[in-house]
Image: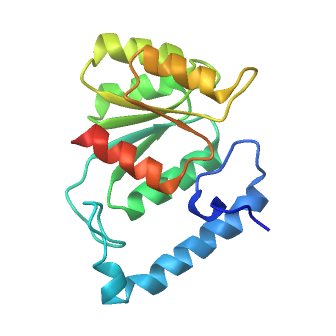
């Protein structure tokens, strides 16, 4: 049984095995599909986010995380909301993507191989100072909060702890893009 409030968290921690979160992602997709057909549910959004299945000329978001299932769930979540998504597995790969692909926002994990998120934020501040970064972390050797505080001190626009709350995710994206 899930603790109270856990139903809102759809983005998983990298420590959680995929077999635990994949069924809840499928259930969320089925629920979205069934509610998309109800006009009173579909039209109830007043926060400016797109309705399920609605395609808009939306921003492009670069997801940078070394854990492929986390990238996959974030991609699915953001594409369902109408955003274009590109991915990278670490900071170096993200910088290569940015050479060829214009993006409006970067969602960046902090703990990664090759080039960690903190180092990547420093490079982005020097090379793309106006590009907003949302830092994400589930922790590591030290607490997630310490990593996220450091990320914000170095220039991250927002910092979100894994597992990421759905509403916090979209609030941060909306704030970064407006």
**Residue 101 appears at what percent x and percent y?**
30, 35
**Residue 160 appears at what percent x and percent y?**
52, 37
Q: Residue furthest front?
A: 4
Looking at the image, which residue is at 76% across and 21% down?
141
Looking at the image, which residue is at 45% across and 48% down?
169
Q: How is the image coloured?
A: rainbow
Q: Quadrant of the N terminus?
A: bottom right
- In the rendered image, which quarter is residue 173 located in? top left
Is 147 situated left or right of 131 in this image?
Answer: right
Is 32 situated left or right of 140 in this image?
Answer: left
Looking at the image, which residue is at 51% across and 13% down?
119
Q: Quadrant of the C terminus?
A: top left
- Number of dots carrying numbers: 0
Picture layout, residue 54 above or below residue 60: below
- In the rendered image, which quarter is residue 161 located in? top right
**Residue 92 appears at what percent x and percent y?**
50, 21
**Residue 91 appears at what percent x and percent y?**
50, 23
Decide which of 178, 14 is in the foreground and name it: 178
- In the rendered image, which quarter is residue 134 located in? top left
Looking at the image, which residue is at 72% across and 20% down?
142
Q: Residue furthest bottom?
A: 38
Picture layout, residue 10 above or below residue 105: below
Picture layout, residue 115 above or below residue 37: above
């Amino acid at each position: 049984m899930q603790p109270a409030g856990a139903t809102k968290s759809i983005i998983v921690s990298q420590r959680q095995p995929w077999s635990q979160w994949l069924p809840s992602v499928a259930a969320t997709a089925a629920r979205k599909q069934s509610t998309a057909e109800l006009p009173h549910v579909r039209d109830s959004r007043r926060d400016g986010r797109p309705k399920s299945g609605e395609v808009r000329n939306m921003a492009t978001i670069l997801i940078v995380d070394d854990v492929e299932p986390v990238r996959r769930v974030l991609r699915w979540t953001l594409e369902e909301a109408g955003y274009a998504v590109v991915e990278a597995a670490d900071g170096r790969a993200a910088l290569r993507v940015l050479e060829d692909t214009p993006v409006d926002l970067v969602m960046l994990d902090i703990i990664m191989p090759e080039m960690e998120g903190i180092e990547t934020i420093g490079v982005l501040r020097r090379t793309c100072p106006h590009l907003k970064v949302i830092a994400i972390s589930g922790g590591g050797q030290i607490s997630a909060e310490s990593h996220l505080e450091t990320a914000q001190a170095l220039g991250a626009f927002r910092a979100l702890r894994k597992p990421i709350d759905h509403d916090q995710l979209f609030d941060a994206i909306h704030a970064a893009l407006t």
